[in-house]
Amino acid sequence: MKRRLFFAALALAVPGFAQTLKMESVPNPAGADSLQAAWSVTREGAPLLSWIETLKDGSYTLRYSIRRGAQWSEPRTVVAGRKFFRHPAELPEVMTLSDGGFLAHWVEMPMEGSDTENLYVSASRDGEHWTPPVMAHKDKSPVQHGLASMVSSGNREASVFWLEALKGEDGPVALKRTVISGDGKVIKEETLDSDTCACCPTSVVKTARGLLVAYRDHTPEDIRDIAVIRLENDRWSASKILNPDKWKLDACPINAASASATGDHVVISWYTGAQNMPRVQAIFSTDSGSTFGKPVLVSTGRSFGYTSAALIEGGAIVSWLEQAGDATRVLARYVSDAGVAGPVLQVATGSQRNLGYPRTVHAGNETWITWRGADSKLQTARLTK
């Protein structure tokens, strides 16, 4: 209570910190039955939206479109007819490299009901013609390889971070990195953490000093807190806990962290159920993730998590899912880097299953959010403060 009163007083004392968000719905070119949306930012600073779309024959395709000025580009197809793993936490991504080429990753489930999940990548020079999909991991056994995130990490190359469950979800499950060339070939694979939470997504950003990966860690005592690991000067730091929530759980929450960065500034939002208080928190760094400040409580009620953060000037916009009676709300709010959270904006309501995993991104001077609407079509909106 004292913390909430302090923040409220600070917000009144410092005008402009606790700013109210506004939302402008913007149509997008995704089809009528679309899901698993993800954002990236092109090398020119434009937002790129990718998604899985159901075709008229019942098959699925991975598509994307780029917002240039006030228009979306004509949607282009990366791959079609693949056995995509259709789960809200398994988000395919399409991104551009430093030379203008494209890379994409996605997860497939070759047999429905099986534990087998395989991670694939494909590349393109022009965004239209794509290389044959290549499995991004050396292991070919029928286990889980997925929950990936990707970032441009060098000259015409990208790094994909993912989880490998060689012994099933009962573990241990490893955090892995695969380096992919601009022509879609696997360059190398390495293990970064040998014991992580089995089914929580990874998140990676590029800072002024190198790469930073946020993921849900795991201990033999079943403590499942968020950890970060950094690549600086071609050396990986030791993994460290972002904040000691001490969430003990003998299960996998399918719920993790979201990182966003510009230069040395980083924000990470995450979900925890520690102390039987399901909530979303956010934390800031001004030294590329070497150190972090104190966590800020972002959610206001019983949170379902599925958070996403977008770093903007002076702070961040954080979105999450929260219970609202028998329904679920997509909520967002501005959080200043001084730790003051502004008023909550309701973006959408619906069922938790249908809303999917809302995602935010800051591209150029605009912040965007996407979620799945009640009509099973992806929705997009611009957020301003």
Image (cartoon, grey):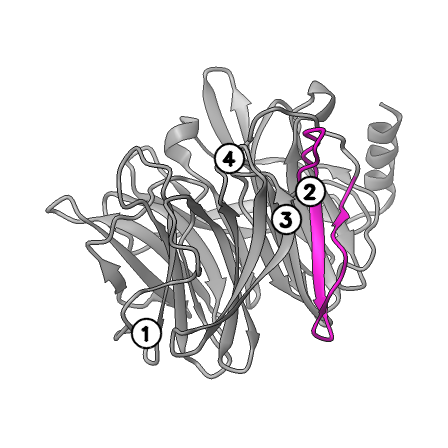
Q: Where is residue 244 in the image (x, y as percent from the top left)?
A: 79, 37
- Say which element carries label 3: strand
Residue identifier under label 1: 127
Alpha carbons under labels 2 and 3: distance apart: 15 Å
User: In terms of depth relative to the viewer, which is nearer, 370 or 292?
Assistant: 292
Check the image and report above or below for 157 versus 4.
below
Q: What residue range appears in magenta?
A: 218-243
Residue 173 coordinates in the image, percent (x, y): 56, 43
Q: Which of marks 2 and 1 is nearer the N terminus?
A: 1
- Label 4 amino acid? Glu
| Residue assigned mark 4 | 169
Q: Is residue 267 left or right of residue 31?
A: right
Q: Which residue is drawn at 74% across and 75% down?
A: 233
Label 1: which secondary element: loop
- Residue identifier under label 2: 226
**Kind of residue sitting beneath label 3:** Ser
**Callout 4: few (<14), some (14-19), or many (20+) C-alpha neighbours within 10 Å?**
some
Q: Which-is-in-front pick, marks 1 and 3? A: 3
